[in-house]
Amino acid sequence: MPYVNIKITREGVTTEQKAALIKGATQLLVDVLGKNPATTVVVIEEVETDNWGVGGESITVRRKAGK
């Protein structure tokens, strides 16, 4: 039973976009590894931008700086 965990920043991702991620990740495992889509689990975790950092800065700070 494959388990996929997708982490994204919480920045207004729509329900439709999340559904597309779930469908796409599931199909990728079917296509590449021959996994059964009925037993493939996909979890999307949304992380606040204050809790995600790159290059020593939070995403909140990077967004404000236009990075």
Image (tube, helix red, strand yellow):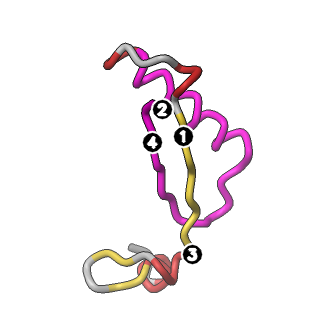
- Residues at badges 1 and 3 in contact (C-beta under 8 Å)? no
Q: Which mark is residue 25?
A: 2
Dot label at residue 48: 3
Left or right: 48 as drawn, with respect to 29:
right
Query: CB of mark 2 within 8 Å of CB of mark 4?
Result: yes
Amino acid at the residue labelled 4: Val
Residue type indicated by callout 3: Glu
Q: Position of residue 17 (x, y in %)?
A: 65, 41
Tag 4 secondary structure: strand
Disc 3, SS? loop
Question: Magenta segment, which residues?
Answer: 1-30
Q: Residues within 10 Å of mark 4 (few under 14, many from 20)?
A: some
Q: Which image quarter is the C terminus in?
A: bottom left
Q: Secondary structure at mark 2?
A: helix
Circles 1, 2 touching at the beta carbon (< 8 Å): yes
Residue occupied by mark 1? 42
Label 2 vs 3, first from the N-terminus:
2
Numbered tag placed on residue 4 in the rendering:
4
Query: In percent of the image, x 56 and y 59: which residue is there?
Result: 45
- Furthest residue toward right: 15
Identified at 54% across, 20% down, the residue is: 37
Q: CA distance from mark 2 to mark 4?
A: 8 Å
Q: Amino acid at mark 2?
A: Ala
Q: Position of residue 47 (x, y in %)?
A: 54, 69
Dot 2 surroundings within 10 Å: few (below 14), some, or many (20 or more)?
some
Q: Nearer the viewer, mark 2 or mark 4?
A: 4
**41, above or below 34, in the image:** below
Closest to the camera, between mark 1 and mark 3, is 1
Give the crowd class for mark 3: few <14, some 14-19, many >=20 residues within 10 Å: some
